[in-house]
Amino acid sequence: MQTEKVDVLVIGAGPSGTVAASIINKAGYSVKIVEKLKFPRFVIGESLLPRCMDALTEAGFIDAVAEKGFQKKFGAKFVKDGKICDFTFEDQHTPGWTWTWQVPRADFDKTLADTVEKMGVPVEYETTVTDIKFFGSDSVTTVEDIHGNKKQIEARFIVDGSGYGRVIPKLFGLDKPSVLQPRKALFAHTHDVRRSMADEPNRITAVVHQKGVWIWIIPFSTGITSVGFVGDHTYHDQYSGTREEQFRAMLEAEPHTRERFRGVDFAFEPRVLEAWSATTDKFYGDGFVLTGNVTEFLDPIFSSGVTLATVSAQTAAHLVIKKLQGGQVDWEKDYMVPTMQGVNVFRSYVLAWYEGTLDTIFFSKNPDPVIKRQICSVLAGYVWDQGNPYVENHEDALKRLARLIELTEKLNSPA
C-alpha cells in the first residue's frame, strides 16, 4: 500500500479545514487535505458574520473571496407580525469588522479550497478516511478514493475539520447528543424576482412565523435568495404532499413571504436538513484537534457556523504550529476553553430565541441603544469580547433584560 508523509493531515476542505491548512502551511509545514465529497457541493450556513473576516484575512482568503462578487452583508433584520428590529453592524459595541458576505456556500467553499491549493496545499477530493491509528502524537491514516484505491498518510498531527462528517468523533465513539431540541429545516434557493432593494439585499432577514418556528431569507448578488423554514417536527408534520407543495404552502402561510415568493421558480427542489445538533466530550487528543462543526453545530438562526468554524481553526492552527515547533501546548486552557466560550454564548442566544426571550427584547417599544449595540456585537460574532456584558453574563443577562422590559411595558400600558 502506498504511503505518504506530511507534517499535518487536514480532514475536510470546508472553511475550517482550509483556514487551518493555510495558516499552518504559511508557517512552513507540509499539509495535505483529504475531502470525502466532490466540490462544489451544497451546504447551509450561507450568511457569514463579521468576526470570521479576521480568520479569512489571516488565512489569505479575503482577496480571492472579494473577486467573486458575493453579496456584502451589513446587518441582520428580525421581523414578527409586521414589527421590525434591524441591527447594523456599524453600530456595535465591539471594535472590529462592520460587514461580511452572504454566499452560496458551494461557490464560497470552492473558492477557499482553490485558493489554498494555489498556496501549495494539495486537496484530494472524493477521498474517505477509513481508519486512523495514533502512536503518541504521530498517526497513520488510511484513506480510500472513489475508485477504491487505498493508501496511508503518516502525519505528525491531524486537524479534523470534516464538519457534519465528524470523522474522528465517529471513528472513536466521541459523539454525544446536543442539549438543543432536534429541529428540521425545509429550504430552497429561489429566483427572487420581486426582491425589494429598499432594505435588502445587504442583510439577512429572520422572520418569526410562530413560537419556535422561523424563516431565513438570505439574498445573494446573483438574484437568487435562500429561504428556509425551521421548526420542530410538529410544525413540519402539518404539511403534506411533495416537498415543493409543502414549501409553497409554508410561504403562503406567512404574510411576510406570501406575495414576494408566490409562484417563484426554484434553483433546486426544496431540501430537508434535520437533527443537525451534535457535540463531543473533548475537542482534542494526542495527535489531533477538532475544529468547526466537528466540535458542535448549534443552529442556523444566528449564522454562527462559519464563524465558529474559522475562528476555532485559526486558534487550533497556531497551537498546532507551536506543537510542531516543540513547544508545550495546554489544549484545555488555550483551545477547549475559548472554543467553548464561543459555543456557549451562541447557545444561550439560540435558546433565548426559541424560548421567545429575544422576541421580547428585539421587539420592545423603546430599546436601549447601548444594550442594542452590545447585543449587535454578539450577532456580529464577537462572542469572545468579555468587556461586553451580554457576552460575559450571557446565561442570565438576556433573561433579566426581558423581565425588565416586560415589567416596564406593563407599568406603562394604559389601565
Image (cartoon, grey):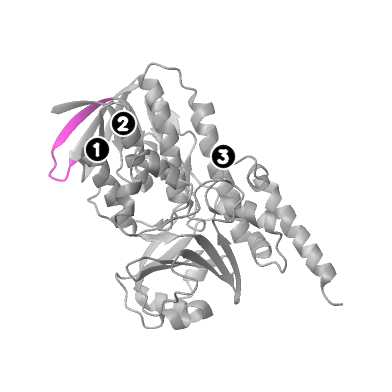
Earlier in the chain: of badge 1 and badge 2, it is 2
Q: Residues within 10 Å of mark 1 (few under 14, many from 20)?
A: some
**360 w.r.t. 343: above or below:** below
Q: Is residue 76 left or right of residue 3?
A: right
The amino acid type, in three-letter code, at marker 1 is Met
* Residue type, label 3: Gln
Task: Inspect the magenta stretch and tell me whether residue 182 lies in it.
Answer: no
Q: Which residue is mark 1?
A: 119
Please provide the residue range marked out in magenta.
145-155
Secondary-structure class at tag 2: helix
Residue 384 rendering spot, x and y as whole percentages? 56, 41
- Seen from the viewer's position, the closer of residues 139 and 336 is 336
Q: Are marks 1 and 2 in contact (CB under 8 Å)?
A: yes
Residue at (59% x, 41% y) in the render: 385
Q: Distance of mark 1 from mark 2, alpha carbons?
A: 8 Å
Crowd class of label 2 (few under 14; some 14 to 19; many from 20; radius 10 Å): some
Residue position for label 3:
341
Q: Quadrant of the N terminus?
A: top left
Q: Quadrant of residue 408?
A: bottom right
- Can residue 294 be seen in the rendering of this structure? no
Amino acid type of the residue tagged 2 in the rendering: Lys
2 or 3: mark nearer the eye = 2
Name the chief secondary structure element in magenta: strand
Residue indicated by mark 2: 26
Above or below 258: residue 229: above
Q: Within 10 Å of the Cα at label 3, are there few (<14), some (14-19), or many (20+) other Cα atoms?
A: some
**Which mark's residue is nearer the viewer, 3 or 1?**
1
**Do the residues under discs 2 and 3 have CB atoms within 8 angstroms?**
no
Q: Position of residue 193 (x, y in %)?
A: 36, 79
Classify residue 141 as left or right of residue 188. Answer: left
